[in-house]
Amino acid sequence: KKVLVKVDNLVKYFPIRAGVFKRIVAWVRAVDDISFEIYEGETVGLVGESGCGKTTAGMTLLRLYEPTSGRIIVDGKDTTYYFMPRYRAKKYLKKMYIEKFKKEDPSKFTGIDKEYYELYEELGESGFYSKLLDNITEKRRDFRRTMQIVFQDPYSSLNPRIRVKTIVSEGPVLHGLIKKSEVVDKVKEVLEEVGIHGEHMYRFPHQFSGGQRQRIGIARALLMNPKLIVADEAVAALDVSIRSQVINLMLELQKKHNLTYLFISHDLSVIKYISDRVVVMYLGKIVENASKKELFDNPLHPYTKALMSAIPVPNPEYKKKRIILTGDVPSPVNPPSGCRFHPRCPVAKEICAKEEPQLKEVSPGHFVACHFPGSLK
Ligand code: SF4
């Protein structure tokens, strides 16, 4: 399978400012060094409590926030510098590639490093910069087109003053994907695809229900011909019955158009239904990453286990052991030392407060960041 998106040591901190001069007094470490991959055509579920950094991770990946550090590689291209001013982009490329190329042994380079090294060998340093920095506006536009988002709140994510026809077609027309003369046909087609009457394109968003609005949001993303759709709590605001309809629609569209989803949710039962692979976050870090089957059959991180024990079971006679976590989620401004989960972990030992566990592959494709994986029974 082809890797579509590779998130490499991504960090996003937000400054807290105070005083008359608005000096930075602290940092919110919302996303703190996370790495994961999304393969083409799959759905990755990103799950965790509110405040764990999952939405920030999604927004940074889409470049709605500028990353503090790290790399976002899309389709084999480093896109991290796309939205930086030219001088900063050049600085980034110098630090990330040129300095490395001059220092390290080229035979050890793999993936994008290898590819960019070959480019550097062929074109020289200045040629390398111009190759990567030229046509940056086009690159940005292409990025914005291929990386789409469906927001949580269908009530506020659609402009109430604009008719659905314009909402859905605005982006594609701007990007030259459809001609003005084709708008009516294309909008009709895409609306019918998401289960809305084509004739309703002349209505305003308030004339639709929450579920229908979310379908319009999906249609808007779909008409951009995207590679990746980030769905940020896309069904959280909907009624339970409507929720499953929207999820099923997303799955159908995925099959038809070979779409790739990053599905962000706090709800493990939704994640279980839609995902192929699941990434669990806690306080800005990834604590577990595995295929859905592996994660739900054999959760190894105590936090994942606790989250799972909270999923309601349909049969009340079947008594499941609940793991109740004590204490609140600590602040991302001053995260606990060592393992960030240690103040709440039922099986924490001395080392947990001192040494930060790294994300390690414990069985093929199953990654856990814990000193004692699987110890919570
Ligand atoms: Fe618990 Fe220690 Fe594992 Fe952290 S490293 S989850 S504190 S056992």
Image: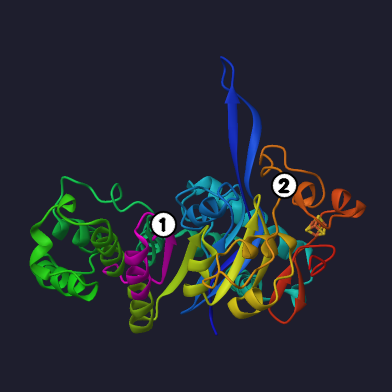
What residue is shown at x 32% (from left), y 74% (from top)?
Answer: 249
- Residue 287 visible here: no
Q: Residues within 10 Å of mark 2 (few under 14, many from 20)?
A: few
Q: Which quadrant of the view contains residue 138?
A: bottom left
What residue is shown at x 40% (from left), y 76% (from top)?
Answer: 259
| Magenta stretch contains residue 9 | no
User: Ligand 1 is found in which quarter of the picture?
Assistant: bottom right
What residue is shown at x 54% (from left), y 59% (from top)?
Answer: 129
Q: Nearer the viewer, residue 6 or 339?
A: 339
Residue placed under numbered mark 2 in the picture: 326
Q: Which quadrant of the view contains residue 168?
A: bottom left
Q: Which quadrant of the view contains residue 18?
A: top right
Magenta residue span: 223-248
- Mark before the other along the chain sequence, 1 or 2: 1
Q: Secondary structure at mark 2?
A: loop
Three-letter residue code for mark 1? Ala
